[in-house]
Image (tube, rainbow, N blue to C red):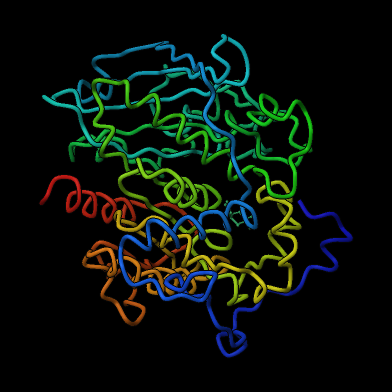
Amino acid sequence: LLTPAAHAQRPKPNYDESQVPQFKLPDPLVTSQGKKVSSAKEWQKVRRPEILELFETEVYGKSPAPPKDMLFEVTSVKNDALGGKAIRKEVTVYFSGKKEEPRMDLLIYVPAKATKPVPVFMGLNFYGNHTITDEKDVKLNDHWMRANKDKGIVDHKATEASRGTSSSRWPIEKIIDRGYGLVAIYCGDIDPDYDDGFKNGIHALYNSKQKPAPDEWGTISAWAWGLSRALDYLETDKHIDASKVAVMGHSRLGKTSLWAGAQDPRFALVISNDSGCGGAALSRRRFGETVHVINNAFPHWFCDNFNKYIDKENDLPVDQHMLISLIAPRPVYVASAEDDRWADPKGEFLSVKYAEPVYKLLGTSGFGAKKMPGVNDPVQKQMGYHIRTGKHDVTDFDWEQYLNFADQHFQGS
Ligand code: GTR
């Protein structure tokens, strides 16, 4: 990923808490004019739009308005999927309204026994919808993918061998048994995950093959925008309660779920799994992955303005606790893993904590945790957090917590 020269210059990551620099975070509840925000109205009218704009122009880049004519095509329906437990559907979204690129495929599972529209989890995946399920008859994704032998990717394309290779991260049956649906999308359908000067994916439709301006969308913004377009479709699907969509993502796709939830208030619940730098972790801590390292390794993820803050995190007008604050008052859940020090678990926890004053101002139960909770000891109020044992991954433990959290907020139990 890094060129040899960039790799040689790459600063050594810090994993020593005593080496974390002193810093002062910008206050989500003080306006750019220095005025204290003391009512929900001031938050919604003045401060929230300010913060949103700062993330758009300085971090992820602005996205365009939705296309005028999207076309939704249901390409398959199976009424007895998962041994009869689920209805399974595949839907293609054509962004231009014509049956051509760019397009994304949605794989949808809903409980077969549901008598009314169901709440769903929606998430992007890394290697195609066919990787999340053991069912062999879903469409094999035909778009470009990052090289990965373990995932059965050959010449940047999925092969039959890639089926089901990510199924451990998506416990579909458990989700269905708990009364939820699942909507899956391959991130590369929206924008392939490589630095191509923004010629491909959805960028091509809007930018006429021009590189975006320094404050215009990078790939994370494109992915988040795609999630909102998927939600546009869900609003038309009679099996789904579009007012109860939880957007969930892991790692780079967790950065994306937070940014999608921050921008689009239709997402009723937002989950970040091990999102780290540029996601839930505070940039100013410089622990594990830093703004420097991430912009070098993945120059296409953020907007070009984000490069201004390489080794100058204190100049950032925001930090990632303010990304979480944009989701308020909606429920938000941040998860870390003990061995995932690259993603800075403590920095992820602190973002939730420092966003809590906004959640409190808006009249919610907030977070409650003052100190980092113990390993495998989740905190779940309006804001949720856990750190579990193990590595950078999505596990059954993570899903158990997300389902419990969704029960609390969607089913009132
Ligand atoms: C890493 C990157 C992280 C995280 C991760 C992933 O290489 O440094 O920010 O996004 O990839 O997405 O798995």
Q: Position of residue 305 (x, y in %)?
A: 72, 56
Extreme residue toward the right, this view: 5
Q: Position of residue 366 (x, y in %)?
A: 27, 68
Looking at this view, is 132 or 123 the one in front? 123
On screen, 162 above or below 37?
Answer: above
Q: Is residue 79 left or right of residue 343?
A: left
Looking at this view, is 166 or 241 the one in front? 241
Q: Position of residue 199 (x, y in %)?
A: 75, 30
Q: Image point 27% across, 25% down: which residue? A: 82
Ligand 1, seen in the image, is in the quarter at bottom right
On screen, 2 above or below 284?
Answer: above
Q: Is residue 360 left or right of residue 142?
A: left
Looking at this view, is 76 or 355 the one in front? 355
Residue 213 found in image quarter: top right
On screen, 175 above or below 358?
Answer: above
Q: Image point 79% across, 32% down: which residue? A: 210
Looking at this view, is 70 or 380 the one in front? 70
Q: Image point 41% across, 38% down: which residue? A: 167
Q: Position of residue 284 (x, y in %)?
A: 60, 75
Q: Image point 63% across, 24% down: which residue? A: 143
How many numbered markers are drawn?
Answer: 0
